[in-house]
Image: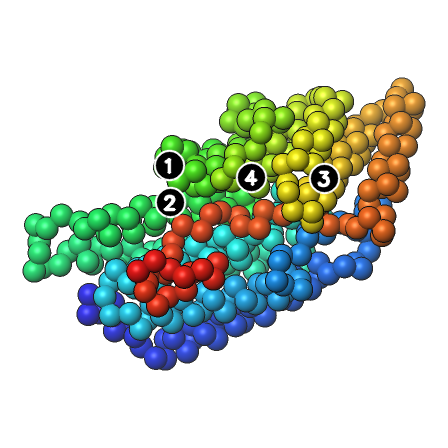
Amino acid sequence: MDVHRGQLANPSRWCKVTLVTWAFASACTAVAQTDAPGNPPQNGRPDVRLASLPGFADDAVFLASVASRVAELQQQAGEATDAARKTGFILAAANLILAEQLEPPCSRKFLQLDTPLQGEDAVVAAALDRADALLVEAEAYLLAEQKDPMEEDAPPTDQAKELSRIAVTLKAFAQALRTYLVMEADSDSSRDARRAASGLSILLEDDNSQIAAGAAFWQACLRAMEPDPTPALDILDRAIVELPTDAPRFGFFSRLLRCRLVAARGGPAAALALLMQVEERADGWFKADPDRTDALRSCVWLRLRVLQDWHDRLDATSHADERAWCRSRIDTLRAQRFSDASGVTVLRLNQAIPIIARPPGPNATPPDGTPAPP
């Protein structure tokens, strides 16, 4: 324990942490700025972008704020005097990286926006590596605490059990996001996706409904990376089933995924019909006007993608009329729903995974800004 405490309290180490953190924030800012309004549309598509997060002018400002909060949590871990508090701060920092720093690339990839942005792959890999390193550090503290020579036969405390549970949960989510976002060279992507999806299985029955919903969503996303969409479809709820009240965004994005998989399985007409039904229900699912508008536009954006894919698969000679119909529908939807007057933003996840690791109280402030419990 003394060795670990000395490592964390080393001032030169924390200076390095701060420099790395702000270098990472600068990289995030550079990537986010390339997603600013006004960039030309690619491949004739509308210039669609993610909706802004409340309280932030753009993703560049948001990502810089997240990086600052991660650095503060790491600094608090270095100043803590016992293993449990250190672990709590470290897990909160890792959770923040996974939930918020990785949310923009997760949302963009899911919605099939024109990604990756310039430099984003390196930033994503760095964020995942930092989260993994923090989780390894947290596990080391937990292990050291359990091996206290003064209490060799003492069972783990309830606090230690809870911290261990959080660490296991975050590790499963971290592996899922890495597999989803990073294409490893010379690897079997389908096998990797199945393995990461399997790691989420234990979370599907979690008492925390947000953890369970997030695990189900990412498990379906991972299984959707396989050539056969059937396993992913088997996981997902029906498209027109009401959203879970505790995790509406995971529920909504799961319904969009189902529609996309129906189209991929050879049913573009059925997918378009389902998307229209989801759009109709989304008008009541989302109460806040900006979210509702962005959710509706997300459905239309996916309809555009399905129509474009359908058009491209049809033979130009034998299906000229069908291709003309697809082009006509694409033009109509673009003019009606993606004009400058109506806006070009779509709904985002807001958090890639739930925030489940709260910094230790009583004076700490958790990532969402609400007072932490004592």
Q: In whole angstroms, how far apart are the C-alphas of marks 3 and 1?
A: 31 Å
Q: Quadrant of residue 4?
A: bottom left
Q: Does the image show residue 193?
A: no
Foreground of the two, 222 or 75 = 75
Q: Mark 3 or mark 2, which is nearer to you? A: 3
Name the residue: 82% across, 25% down.
Answer: 314
Q: In whole angstroms, how far apart are the C-alphas of marks 4 and 1?
A: 17 Å
Going by the numbered disc 4, the residue's amino acid type is Pro
Name the residue: 57% across, 50% down.
Answer: 350
Q: Which mark is residue 206?
A: 1
Name the residue: 77% across, 50% down.
Answer: 344
In this figure, which residue is indicated by the disc labeled 2? 169
- Report the side of 338 relative to 220 (left or right): right
Q: Which mark is residue 248?
A: 4
Q: In whole angstroms, how far apart are the C-alphas of marks 3 and 2?
A: 32 Å
Foreground of the two, 92 or 221 = 92
Q: Does the image show residue 325?
A: yes
| Circle nearer the N terminus (3, 1) | 1
The residue carrying pointer 4 sits among few (fewer than 14), some (14 to 19) or many (20 or more) residues within 10 Å by Cα, namely some
Q: Residue 275 carries which label?
A: none
Q: Residue 296 carries which label?
A: 3
| Circle nearer the N terminus (2, 1) | 2
The residue carrying pointer 2 sits among few (fewer than 14), some (14 to 19) or many (20 or more) residues within 10 Å by Cα, namely many
